[in-house]
């Protein structure tokens, strides 16, 4: 490479500005993305340090006028450089502007002071505070004493928690609290300033337990192997396939402890929906004040503060969803990704990165290692463990051999034959009656996915699929059935092409209908519904879950939201009303997502001492993902699913790159999609298969029309190369200049 694009200022406003320099002979082959270099700047003979953003052979200006890089600023890659290198990788792999990529990985400084309600809290026991107060009064430190006394009064009043707490603003007004006093008291360790949205460390130092219990041999074996392997320099990611409750979290914590002992830091990714107080509490118990958390309720400023604490070394373990991956630790040792199969690890904004892939890249850059865990690993990760790219570990049993739930599959075609057209099969209804009679709780789960319905026959279960892509067609307006990949369309069928029955149509069911049907079938039962409508209000989500856990309801009806990350020991029956809903969602991951959801849903039954049962209702009882889920047989599912992916060249057997095209003008969009395809074809190579353009699942969102074009290829490099070409070409395309065009590599969630 002959040239390097350099940024000289990483304050937010200037991220866009890169400058090109010539790479001198002695730095050829040495220079890497993220390295800090010294460069001449301007005409006044100034020298600045900057970071290498990109290496390239394309000269943006007059080659003769480019100045050379003077030299390396320091050896190795510093933290900022590591994150910049990660941003460069993200831009290259997923497609975005460099600015978008940098903003994703570098902690964003807040430019405006945000108004947040801050609390002042006692940081010591009441006895210690009283002793300190006496001392202050003796020394006539009245300002400090006034605050401490007010806090102690509060602590006295609030008998339950015994924790004194004042609102910062109120204390300023009424007690004359100044910033200097607050700082001094904080330095003395007597108070703590917190915003209310930050999880407070609920654990007192004396409650921190280094070794809560000894690991079981199966757990210890994993820890030993990972520690020995990584110490020997084998930094391949570890994939822990372990059923829910098999002790994975304890293994993560033991590995983290080993990393901390070496003076390094740890990042733990947990999907937002599973980031519950109980989970967080376990980490606090084990690691005390070294733990910090970020979550979506934090403001940008608070997030930045958490990141700053990490940078200063006040925090060693950061827990959070996807974006916690960018915690600015300088000596990162381990990245744990729990529930690694979760779709929420894929970003929905450019760059549309996958946190798992980005974690592996970050670990590679800084010499850390990655641990993935799941009860239902993604097909992608399991396949990589088969190929030896990841090291697989298994925990096939629950701790203390607690029972797995029993699972029954009900054939809904059979119900129709028996004349039962209700939402509840005879078997589910019978079990519901039984549980209600015993005062036990029930969850009814509707695994709705996507937006358009698929078309199926209720008599024989036949589902109408795309002849080219082997995914279900979706019913769109005007009675059209559409393939979301290739754009194939046909008129909606009036008769089942397989059995001739007229019971064919779009499959629709909503949580409201289910709740109504349950109320009608069981008039005395108390029913709660949790879906997008009932949780739209702030806190709606938590309120419903809390009411259910307090047994204020007998039946909880809901979508995906109810099966993830929540433990309800009172639940002994889970009904999956129509497994078909996610099975035929019209994308290549439908079967995988269904298997994961069914296993998770079944896992909700019988968390307590009473063994539970899961009933899966379906028109496709023979589908491998349902058969395997009922048998809790991951490997059987995986084998079949991989066969399908291989046959159809879907990831991980190949790579799939999507181009999303968005515009408010429908006609212009159609024209633009045509031009995009032309352009795409003009540069394609025989190894690349071009599919579409087509209408995605959501062909219009907030008045913006959407189209999508796919490229399939076994070589990721060919797709990346094509994307780079396209990115360079697009600005010159007049017709396409008004569209929003985004790239996506290996999409996970339907667009
Ligand atoms: P997973 O993360 O796989 O769902 P957990 O780590 O949460 O599993 O373990 C499930 C339960 O078993 C937890 O309550 C945990 O405290 C307990 N547990 C795990 N390992 C041990 C152990 N070695 N000894 C005693 N209890 C354990
Ligand atoms: Zn039929
Ligand atoms: Zn198709």
Image (cartoon, rainbow, N blue to C red):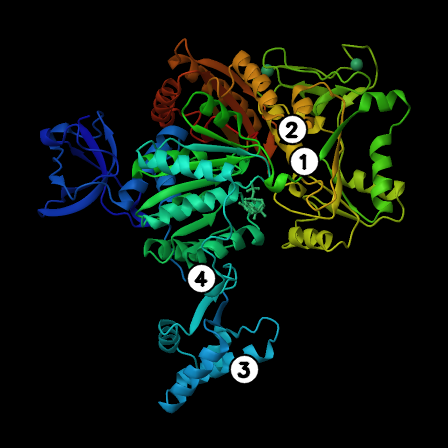
Query: Residue 114: which disc?
Result: 4
Q: Secondary structure at mark 4?
A: loop
Residue mark closest to the camera, 2 vs 4: 2
N-terminal of the pair, mark 3 or mark 2, is: 3
Residue underneath mark 2: 632
Q: Secondary structure at mark 1?
A: loop
Relative horizontal placement of residue 482, taking residue 426 as reference (left or right): left
Residue underneath mark 1: 404
Q: Is mark 3 within 8 Å of ligand 1?
A: no
Distance Cα–Cα, label 3 vs label 4: 30 Å
Q: Secondary structure at mark 3?
A: helix
Distance Cα–Cα, label 3 vs label 2: 56 Å
Distance Cα–Cα, label 1 vs label 3: 51 Å
Residue 296 percent across, percent down from the top left: 51, 50
Residue mark closest to the camera, 3 vs 2: 2
**Residue 451, quarter of the rendered image:** top right
Distance Cα–Cα, label 1 vs label 2: 9 Å
């Amino acid at each position: 490479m002959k040239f390097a694009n350099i940024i000289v200022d990483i304050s937010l406003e200037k991220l866009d500005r890169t400058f090109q320099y010539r790479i001198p002979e002695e730095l050829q082959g040495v220079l890497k993305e993220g390295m800090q270099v010294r460069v001449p700047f301007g005409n006044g003979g100034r020298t600045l340090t900057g970071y290498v953003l990109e290496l390239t052979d394309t000269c943006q200006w007059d080659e003769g006028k480019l100045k050379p890089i003077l030299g390396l600023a320091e050896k190795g890659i510093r933290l900022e450089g590591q994150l910049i290198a990660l941003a460069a990788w993200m831009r290259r792999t997923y497609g975005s502007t460099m600015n978008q990529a940098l903003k994703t990985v570098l902690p964003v400084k807040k430019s405006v002071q945000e108004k947040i309600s801050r609390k002042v809290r006692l940081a010591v026991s009441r006895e210690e505070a009283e002793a300190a107060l006496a001392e202050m009064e003796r020394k006539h430190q009245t300002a400090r004493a006034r605050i401490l006394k007010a806090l102690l009064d509060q602590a006295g009043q609030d008998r339950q928690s015994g924790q004194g707490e004042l609102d910062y603003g109120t204390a300023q007004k009424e007690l004359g609290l100044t910033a200097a006093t607050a700082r001094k008291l904080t330095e003395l360790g007597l108070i703590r300033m917190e915003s209310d949205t930050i999880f407070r460390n609920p654990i007192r130092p004396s409650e921190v337990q280094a070794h809560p219990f000894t690991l079981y041999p199966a757990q210890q074996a994993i820890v030993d192997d990972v520690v020995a392997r990584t110490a020997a320099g084998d930094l391949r990611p570890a994939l822990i396939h372990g059923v829910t409750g098999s002790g994975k979290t304890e293994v993560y914590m033991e590995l983290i402890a080993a990393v901390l002992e070496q003076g390094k830091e740890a990042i733990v990714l947990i999907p937002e929906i599973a980031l519950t107080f109980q989970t967080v509490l376990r980490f606090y118990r084990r690691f005390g004040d070294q733990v910090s958390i970020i979550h979506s309720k934090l403001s940008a400023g608070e997030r930045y503060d958490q990141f700053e604490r990490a940078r200063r070394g006040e925090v060693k373990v950061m827990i959070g969803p996807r974006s916690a991956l960018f915690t600015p630790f300088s000596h990162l040792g381990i990245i744990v990704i729990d529930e690694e199969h979760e779709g929420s690890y894929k970003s929905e904004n450019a760059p549309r990165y996958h946190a798992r892939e980005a974690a592996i890249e970050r670990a590679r850059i800084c010499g850390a290692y990655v641990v993935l865990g799941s009860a239902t690993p993604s097909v992608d990760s399991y396949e990589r463990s088969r190929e030896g790219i990841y090291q697989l570990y298994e925990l096939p049993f629950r701790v203390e051999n607690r029972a797995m739930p029993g699972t029954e599959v009900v054939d809904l075609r059979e119900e129709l034959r028996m004349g039962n057209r209700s939402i509840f099969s005879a078997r589910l209804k019978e079990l519901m009656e039984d549980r209600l009679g015993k005062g036990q709780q029930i969850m009814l789960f509707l695994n709705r996915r996507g937006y358009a319905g698929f078309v199926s026959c209720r008599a024989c279960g036949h589902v109408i699929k795309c002849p080219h892509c082997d995914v279900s067609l979706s019913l769109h307006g005007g009675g059209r059935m559409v393939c979301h990949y290739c754009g194939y369309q046909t008129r909606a069928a009036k008769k089942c092409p397989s059995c001739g029955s007229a019971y064919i149509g779009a499959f629709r069911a909503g949580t409201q209908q289910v709740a109504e049907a349950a109320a009608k079938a069981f008039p005395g039962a108390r029913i709660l519904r949790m879906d997008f409508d009932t949780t739209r209000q702030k806190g709606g989500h938590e309120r419903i879950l809390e009411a259910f856990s307090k047994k204020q309801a007998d039946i909880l009806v809901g979508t995906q939201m109810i099966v993830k990350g929540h433990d309800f020991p009172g639940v002994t029956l889970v009904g999956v009303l129509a497994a078909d809903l996610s099975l035929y969602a019209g994308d290549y991951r439908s079967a995988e997502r269904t298997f994961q959801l069914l296993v998770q849903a079944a896992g909700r039954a019988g968390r307590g001492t009473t063994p539970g049962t899961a009933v899966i209702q379906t028109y496709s009882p023979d589908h491998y993902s349902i058969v395997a889920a009922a048998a809790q047989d991951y490997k059987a599912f995986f084998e079949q699913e991989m066969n399908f992916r291989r046959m159809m060249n879907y990831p991980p057997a190949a790579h799939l790159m999507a181009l999303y095209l968005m515009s408010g003008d429908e006609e212009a969009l159609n024209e633009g999609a045509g031009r995009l395809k032309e352009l795409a074809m003009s540069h394609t190579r025989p190894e690349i298969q071009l599919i579409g353009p087509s209408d995605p699942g959501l062909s219009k969102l907030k008045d913006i029309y959407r189209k999508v074009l796919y490229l399939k290829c076994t070589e990721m490099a060919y797709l990346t190369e094509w994307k780079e070409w396209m990115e360079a070409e697009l600005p010159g395309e007049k017709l396409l200049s008004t569209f929003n065009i985004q790239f996506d590599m290996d999409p996970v969630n339907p667009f």
